[in-house]
Amino acid sequence: MAAHSVTDLRIKDPVHGSRVTILSVDGGGVRGIIPAVILSYLEAKLQEIDGPNARLADYFDVIAGTSTGGLVSAMLAAPDDQHYPPRPLFDAKSIVDFYMDKCPSIFPPRYVVKDNQSLDAKLSDICIATSAAPTYLPSYKFKNTGKEFNLVDGGVAANNPTFVAITEVVKEISKRNPALSNFEATDYSPFLVLSLGTGSCSSDGYYDAGEASKWGSWQWIIHGGQGCPLIDCFSQASVDMVDYHISVLFDSHDSGYNYLRIDYDKLTKEEGQMDLATQENLKNLKDVGDKLLTLPVSRKNLDTGKLEPFGDQTNKQALDSFAKALSREKKARNDSFLKK
């Protein structure tokens, strides 16, 4: 087991290494417990390799999240001001415990949020805004340095924020950011990306087309107390298209194995609801996360709408390999930094 100083634990800029590391977490309300379980496993694996103080924020250049994924990302990256240099306030296992304990308060069927306007963009403002899913939670307004923001859940545009995260890195490369000066904006092969979904219902038929053809506007917004079909359709379509485009993009650069997408498409109707925060459902979702670790790495087939095995590894084995790659990159950056 390796030993490191606190200073060594913090990730150095990509310019000192050969990869850009990205973590992306989808939106999905209470289903955020599924990627939280996956992240808890990955962090535990990194701790096996690099010691008990290792945290996910020590290994990723970019951590992106939408809606509930934004909450997970914020918890992973939020600093503990009681330590210097600052360390992450939460470990990944704490996020699983947080969801189990606090989801009934955060994601009830109806939730009232008070405006908390500030001249500074507080983390609380960002978290509330990114999880303000229409029909589930109210839209959110706040001010930052005099500019007013009126926001809803990021899942309306990018429920899977992986492409947004990659695009932001490419923009920084194009602007010749010194931290990324050894990368080309048109070359995606150095990118190492972990993208985590929050699950979806079985494609065997969450909604029946014959039944849906008779719906009016109200039924498309609220359907029998089982979520919002309109938002479900748009969100899942966005998630699938992002996964498809990134898969093709990485494959075209002969780096398909640098992109690891972990998701599940066999949730029950109850498990698929964004705001069903009963202890029974939360336990079921945690069990889904544990089960997902044992399943084969999969990619979405857009012709069938179903996940299909990709390669010969389980998600757990792929995460083990991913952890080793993250550790190697971090150590290489440290060595390069010390030589300069």
Image (cartoon, grey):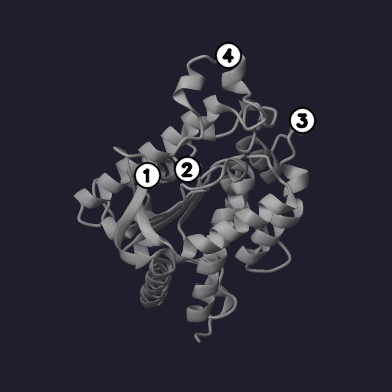
| Quadrant in which residue 133 is drawn | top right
Q: Can you name the residue that lies furthest to the front here?
A: 210
- Find residue 317 and report its horizontal and vertical position in percent: 40, 70
- Find residue 231 and report its horizontal and vertical position in percent: 54, 28
Residue at 38% from the left image edge and 77% from the top image edge: 335
- Find residue 174 and report its horizontal and vertical position in percent: 31, 43
Question: Which residue is at the front of the view, 103 or 340?
Answer: 103
Residue at 67% from the left image edge and 31% from the top image edge: 136
Alpha-carbon distance for marks 4 and 2? 24 Å
Badge 3: residue crowd in 10 Å (few <14, some 14–19, many ≥20) = few
Question: Which residue is at the front of the view, 17 or 215?
Answer: 215
Q: How many marks?
A: 4
What is the three-letter code of the residue carrying label 2? Ser
Alpha-carbon distance for marks 3 and 1? 41 Å
2 and 1 marks in contact (CB < 8 Å): no
- Which label number is shown at residue 217? 4
Q: Which residue is disc 2 drawn over?
A: 202
Badge 4: residue crowd in 10 Å (few <14, some 14–19, many ≥20) = few
| Quadrant in which residue 178 is drawn | bottom left
2 and 3 marks in contact (CB < 8 Å): no
- Which label number is shown at residue 306? 1
What is the three-letter code of the residue carrying label 4? Ser
- Which label number is shown at residue 115? 3
Which one is earlier in the sequence, the residue at label 4 or at label 2? 2
Look at the numbered disc 1 and give the secondary structure of its residue. strand
Look at the numbered disc 3 and give the secondary structure of its residue. loop
Alpha-carbon distance for marks 3 and 4? 29 Å
Residue at 39% from the left image edge and 42% from the top image edge: 163
Which one is earlier in the sequence, the residue at label 2 or at label 3? 3
Q: Is residue 137 left or right of residue 191?
A: right
